[in-house]
Image (tube, coloured by chain):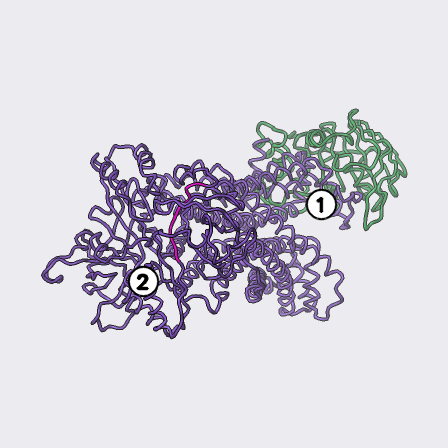
Chain colours: A purple, B green
Amino acid sequence: MIRFIVYMIWRETRGAWRHFMYFVVCIAVGVGALVSVSLFAAHVDRAVTKEARGLLGGDIEIRASRSLSVKALAVLSEVSARGVEITHVSELVAMAARTEGSAEPGLSTQIVELKAVEAAYPFYGKLALDPPQPLDRLLHPTGESCGKTPCLGAVVQEGLLYKMRLSIGDRIKIGTATFMLTGVVRMEPDRMANAFSLGPRVFVSQEGLREADLIKPGSRVRERYLLKLLPDAAFEPLRGELRGRLSGDSVRVTGYRDAQPQLKQFLEQLSRYLGLIGLTALFIGGLGVAMSVHAFVQEKMKTIAILKTLGAGSATIMQVYVGQALGLGLLGTLVGMASGVLLQRILPPLVTDVFASEILVQLGVSLDLSRVSIIPLVKGGLLGLLATLLFTLWPLLGVRTVNPAAVFRREVDGRGRTAITPRWWRRYGFSDGLKVATAAGLLVGFAGLSIWQAGSWKIGILFLGGVLIAALMLIVCARGLISGVAYLPRLRSLSMRYAVGNVGRPGGQTIGIIVAIGLSMTLIVTVSLVEQALLRQVGETRPVDAPTFFFIDIQPDQRESFAQLIFQQAGGARPELTPLVRSRLRSVNGNLVTTEEEHDLDARRDEDKDERRRQWYLSREYVLTYLDRLPKGNEITKGQWWESDREHEKPLLSIEEEAAKAMGLELGSTVEFDIQGATVTAEVSSVRKVDWGNFSTNFYMILSPGALEGAPLSYVGTIHVPPALEATIQQAVVAAFPNVSAIHVGDVLENFGRVLDRLSLAIRTVALFCLIAGGLVLAAALAATRYRRLYESVIFKALGATRELIAGTFAAEYAVVGAVAGIVAVALSSALSWLILTYVFELSWMLQPSVLLSGLLITVLLTLAVGCLSTFQMLSQRPLAILRHE
Amino acid sequence: MIEIGHLTMRLSAGGRTVTILDDITLKIPSKQKVAIVGPSGSGKSTLLGLMAGLDRPSSGSILVDGIDITRLGERPLARYRRSMVGYVFQSFHLIPTLTALENVLVPLELSGVATPDSRARELLGAVGLGDRLHHYPVQLSGGEQQRVAVARAFACRPPILLADEPTGNLDSATGQEVMNLLLSLHRDYGTTLVLVTHDRTVASSMQRLVALRDGRVESDELIDGSPSVFSSVL
């Protein structure tokens, strides 16, 4: 029997290459999409893991949002005495200004991301500089260029040179110090992404930073101490010790192994979603496979009947065709794996765009195959084979019910006489144990594939549920269309009449085509809709009076003069000044809060979402303010806002709704803040709902006036000015207050829009695989009915129809099918985007006619193009040649 | 021995139920040559198909050597068709994607015969197609295709040969060759031969004539006749 099965597989395949080409390509496209994404992700992941120390800049990092206390510094110097190397890095935003006298046009002031380092920086990773000299030497220039005395050097990102029209050797002013530009930084190990930066990087020495005199009490600064251990020393004990001894300083101590969660998480998420899109492509391709197998079984009815007559059991015949399908699936999978290896090379430019930096070069990502490529390749291969099996099993079950006598009878007398028509539940296979079991198995199988690819039960099931619901709706609509055309009034146009007839004809593949094309378009249109909605949110919904600038780090003693300056420069406008101070939670309702690192990352992964959310709220840094009036865009949902002119016995706290919910805070709860070493205890007196998108300064926690007396406050100033005044005001503020940084809201939003655009491009590129798969399914379906179409077109010709009429009929049919797929797709994507916007982004949904219309148009055009390409050959066939063979 | 008892077959066509066979009862002893005759639509081919286990009747029984094949499950029925019956169709029904040799190989491989290749070659040689082994059905004439079909039907030496108008699509000379083949198999191997025919000459070479009309047995009588070809090889 084995011999028979093996030989039959070969015999049945060798002559049917044309038929199976689509089968193979459909699987190959899906597997190609999956493998390219997961290979790329694996290669990046390996590089991230390998570069872990470089990404952190050391073995251990101590991070604080203010200067360390004397006690903490003593701990560090004691650790350093044990042979641990320590280097100090300070990061903050600042304003760079051109020094007077430079005549070149260009921005005279520019916000920059300043990084002050010591000679040992970086311990690990590659810092690429131009000229290729040690950073420390570039930051301490000597010689003639400097004049007689040693001066301060700055190494900057090229973007700064372009924006301010500067060149190496020029000088810039930052704070109160002047720096000479001595080099360009091309790569920085512990800063991978430029995407969300506020401005170009500027490296200076720690002496330079001190000279600039930027850091004041309450200034926004990130102090980092990087530690390099002796080669064979374990880092965990030291990490633990430091966490314990520095706990009073509200610092975060991280080891290099748990250091890259953000980058890693982002890449993981991105590759997970791109992978799911790849899986969608595989599912759509699988639909093509199912349709092609179904058509094959129809075509093979006679052969199956003969085999049964000769004594082959259904199981044997099933084994032949399942074996054949798996063989073809294997071929498709192998082709897909090979193309995945090649296609992963189109992803780097997309990722580079998302991060706006040469992140892959920085990480040293190699896309060549290596040991880490094995798992993605094997996984892609298994997914391809499993999908083949799942999609072919159902149509192949039809083999069992082939009744040889019925097949031969039909052939002899040409009349479709069948056994007595079964009841509906029999017709749909509900009485067939094997069919029901197979259906259950398929569902489990698809769920398994989705969960495996998603790497999460919930996301996998959600994904499959979404795909199934979308497919179901497409099926219902397609069926509706098919039964609807029967009731259409007689159309006048001959080709339209035939086209509509073709759509509703039994044995046509209308449903499959609509599902495949509809699914792929749903995905693409949804991505576009969400992107457009997000862009609209940051762009168009910006209120007219939204601030132009956020001026940060204004010192208490600069308040008056700052306001005055703005008043003069902006024609009488007054800046809104809000006091701020950075803090962490010390205790909630008397329970001490554990810091984030004590609550280990791995442990957090196992916890449910609510607990992770709670931890996130408990361990984050809060920017506190005190206000006497409820700010704009805030609404009290519980309790009452304090009366502005009353003295309060103890500080009162108004907390944001979500934060209160996550931490289980009620009215009357007590919260203790650690404000740079000092503690303030406040009682929750109100809960607020905040409109975070209102472009003002928004706070999770607001304290009653007087609560922050004596705290190291700084102020943030917001001001709305006409565009013509922007440059003047920025220059004036930088000149008068060197320590104040001006964040231009428009620039930030533009940056955000750019990132969003790139991200959406990356997603759409992978979604293109789905579209290709959809097109292939259409081509496969048309190939399956090719002979029937050919025969009909020949008969039409024989009866005197012109080529144009036949072409018109086909085109009209494709257009109708495309239009239905398109209409359902845009409707589904509207619903889907509404869900995403409402529940994920918490934004309002709005009809976007232009996106929907172009989605519909693209669907119709795609269907028309693929349909015409696969059928135009037929039009030139000579009738007699075909009819003679019939 | 084939015993058919109260066999009825109803089919639906265009929403209407048609009775194809109506309470047929018939006994065919082993090694008998039987012709089933009757006008078109009288139910001849359906009766033959039911005897081959290609379909299930609406009611009634078909006992072959005491076993009711209408009650057999999917697997035993396949085994029955494999080992007990050879079937020859009017329109040959060779598998178009398989060569002549491969078509004959199919039943041998299904039965797990040890050297199917040499036996298939022998059989095709015996029907005079030794030089056309690797031709596909479309490359063979009607007579050649039917000879391949006979070789295929007899490949596993089944005790029962059923032929549905085996000469219906052939000219008279070729038809005679095919008939000679079938008759020699009956004679040399004692095969029970049941054939459906319109052809009086063909019918007259059988031992018994069963006439059907409107799904019922109209007459059932004995006659005589037989020539040979196979004996030299098989």
Rendering quarter of residue A853: bottom right
Q: Is residue A838 left or right of residue A703?
A: right
The magenta segment: A579-587
Q: Nearer the viewer, mark 1 or mark 2?
A: 2
**B27 left or right, relative to A668:** right
In the rendered structure, does residue A304 fall within the stretch colored magenta?
A: no
Neighbor class of circle 2 (other Cα within 10 Å; few <14, some 14-19, many 20+) is some
Name the residue type under label 2. Answer: Gln
Chain letter of mark 2 equals A
Tag 1–tag 2 contact (CB < 8 Å): no
3D distance between C-alphas at marks 1 and 2: 103 Å
Above or below, comparing residue A437 to residue A99 in the picture? above
The residue beneath circle 2 is: A558
Front position in the image: A808 or A280? A280
Front in this rendered view, residue A867 or A796:
A867
In the depicted structure, whether residue B123 falls above or below residue A343: above
On the image, numbered disc 1 is attached to which residue?
A: B91
Q: In this view, which residue lies farthest toward the right?
A: B218
Residue A521: numbered disc: none
Q: Which residue is more in the foreground, B153 or A806? A: A806
Q: Nearer the viewer, residue A561 or A522?
A: A561
* Crowd tier of the residue under label 1, counting other residues whose Cα lies within 10 Å: few below 14, some 14–19, many 20 or above: many
